[in-house]
Image (cartoon, helix red, strand yellow):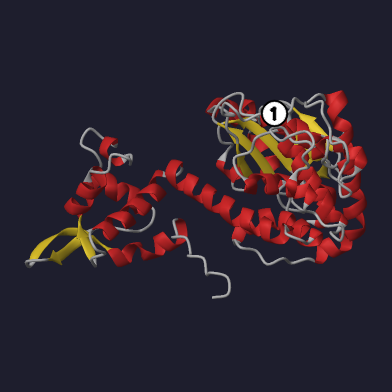
Amino acid sequence: MDDATPTAPSPQVNACAGPPAAVPGRPADEVAPEVANTSASASDGERVLVELREQIRRYVVLPSEEAFTAVTLWVAATHLQTAWQHAPRLAVVGPAKRCGKSRLLDVITESVHDPLITVNASAAAVFRSITSTPPTLLVDEADTLFGSAKVAEKNEEMRGLLNAGHQRNRPTLRVCGPNHEVAKFPTFAMAALAGIGDLPDTIMDRSVVIRMRRRRPGEKVAEFRTFRDTPPLHSLRDRLVAWLTPLHTEAMELTPVMPVQDRAADTWQPLVSVADLAGGSWPDSARTACRLMTEREAAQEQDSGSLSIRLLADIRRAFTTEGNPPALRTSRLLDVLNQDAETPWPEYTSKGLTPRGLQILLNEYGIRSAVRRFHGNVQARGYARLDFADSWARYCPEPVPEVPTGA
């Protein structure tokens, strides 16, 4: 970590916080602009969130400013777990080793509520550690739990626990004691999971996803040393508790306006609620992070997830390329799909995507080809654009264009 510290701390920075004012890559006497610009009239919550964000920025490189906002708000939300209806997961994933996943987990461990660190723990041990005032679960090397089909099957109970614990009042039942009595064990707890590669879809769907990357040459961060660097984080943790504890009842009654819907809204609502409690620029930043990060995950799912959903999106592009006719001949639709080298269709079989393969992938959506009449009074099998409308809207909706402020 940088040895130099500011000669005159900003009046908005807690003197015991130490490192937040000095950020790697900036001169030692330069206060982080996010901290320096926090006015004296800012709320306690606004100030402590800004300083926590700068502490996180000190030790890790995240993929975007929205990711810094999300991690900061997630950490703060752990201190009000009993106020929330849903317990969002923080999925810290990366494509390879040395992307900073474990380092980010090290930093947030020292600032979350009652951290419970696990590496390859059994589901039984974890759910027996969750009480009515839940800890914050921190699971490193989560890929060792779910990395292969064989291992994932062995840890199906853990996946079920993590899925159930996303929502309040989803206990797990076990038969206990010599009388074989049924006992309920709570599962509700916020959890951060770090690992190589994506976690199971059901967990990712309940997560705020941080996609880590290796640092480029020139991207520098401070080294993290537990005994030296945890006191500032503990100080911020204590300030989060002092700020948020009196707001518990208010937090329970909040129903923030969300920029997303369904499970994404459930997952992000605690983070947006914390931002609304803090005020200042945080409400806007939280909603921007929510919207952009959710859109990126939706695009990621479309690109690497279900092949049939990818096909729906590519068929929509094919109709657009052809001028959105009422119907496309099957042969023409396959020509367009198989000519796009950036899609999986040219290599779907040795002959690319075939009429039979196309029909099999579309069967689950109830979409089928039929003999239709095309230009020149030619009859051939094809697909009607209208038949795709419902599936497009449900599984791969086009993003709604933003309305300019003041429009």
- Residue drawn 54% across and 47% down? 297
Q: Is residue 320 left or right of residue 52?
A: left
Name the amino acid, label 1.
Answer: Ser
Q: Position of residue 191 (x, y in %)?
A: 73, 41
The one nearer the camera, 220 or 154, is 220
Q: Quadrant of the N terminus?
A: top right
The residue under label 1 is 102
Considering depth in this image, is 321 or 28 the residue closer to the camera?
Answer: 28
Q: Quadrant of residue 45?
A: bottom right
Q: Check the image and report above or below for 40 versus 14.
A: below
- Please determine whether, in this image, residue 359 is positioned above or below residue 328: above
Does residue 386 appear to the left or right of 267 in the view shown? left
Tell me the element at label 1: helix
- The reply to whether residue 207 is in sight is no
Which picture quadrant has residue 102?
A: top right
- The residue that appears at 76% across and 29% down in the rendered structure is 118
Residue shown at 33% from the left, 39% from the top: 344
Q: How many marks?
A: 1
Relative to 401, residue 59 above or below: above
Residue 206: x and y in percent read 64, 48
Instruction: Count residues near mark 1 (Cα–Cα under 10 Å), then give few for <14, some for 14-19, many for 20+.
Output: some
